[in-house]
Image (tube, rainbow, N blue to C red):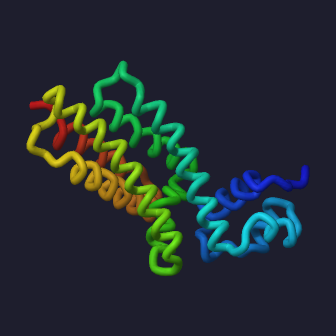
Amino acid sequence: MKRIHNKDEIVQAGLDLILSKGFNATGVEAILKQAKVPKGSFYNFFSSKEEFGLAIIDQYVAEVGEIFHTIFTDESLPPLERIKKSFEARIAKFEGYDCTKGCLVGNLSLEMSDQYESVRERLVQALQLWTKNLSGLLLQAQEERAIPADINADMLAENLIASFQGALLCAKVRKSLEPLRNFIHLYFDIFLAQR
């Protein structure tokens, strides 16, 4: 196997480990071994594990953002269908991991938000970006009269994300997609369904 000397490759190797094992359970030594870099090379790129954690969040948000952007900008689908499809894409990824790993933003929010203020702030930014994207689509859905105009789009977007993260947590614990399927059914077949 080739040695990794590129910062992005080190971040990707660490991201895979941290998604599987968590931030605190993944030591720098494990990251170095996975990335096949000497300790000195790691610290040439990152001053601390905290800084490395911020880079991992940025990488994850960029990867998920690419998937979301493709779905969110697909104007062949109505806004609510795009939102539903974005959650289904995340569920498919989770299923591909045999109901393990989950969402890095959710995982680190539980694990890290009380440990490093910089990490907490970066997670807030990630959630705000997700909320903004969903809220924009919900506003479009309101303009198309697909959902009531008196619903606060930002509040609904935040609630969708919180409910999805909770369903994902339950799915992870149960090793079952059922909580996620229930999330999709309740929101998109019942709560937000056109009447």
Vertical comparison of 93 with 12: above or below: above
Is 120 situated left or right of 101 in this image?
Answer: left
Residue farthest top in this picture: 76
Q: Residue at x 56, y 59 (%)?
A: 57
Q: Residue 117 or 81: which is nearer the viewer?
A: 117
Number of numbered markers: 0
Q: Residue 96 falls in which quadrant of the image? A: top right
Q: Position of residue 193 (x, y in %)?
A: 17, 35
Q: Residue at x 46, y 67 (%)?
A: 121
Is 115 situated left or right of 162 in this image?
Answer: right
Vertical comparison of 48 with 127: above or below: below
Q: Residue at x 88, y 68 (%)?
A: 38
- Please state, as top left, top right, bottom left or bottom right, where the C terminus lies in the image: top left
Q: Position of residue 159 (x, y in %)?
A: 26, 55
Q: Residue at x 41, y 50 (%)?
A: 129
Vertical comparison of 149 with 108: above or below: above
Q: Residue 109 falls in which quadrant of the image? A: bottom left
Vertical comparison of 138 with 182: above or below: above
Q: Residue 166 falls in which quadrant of the image? A: bottom left
Is 92 situated left or right of 159 in this image?
Answer: right
Q: Position of residue 177 (x, y in %)?
A: 41, 50
Q: Position of residue 122 (x, y in %)?
A: 49, 63
Q: Residue 1 or 109: which is nearer the viewer?
A: 109
Is 36 situated left or right of 167 in this image?
Answer: right
Residue farthest bottom in this picture: 115
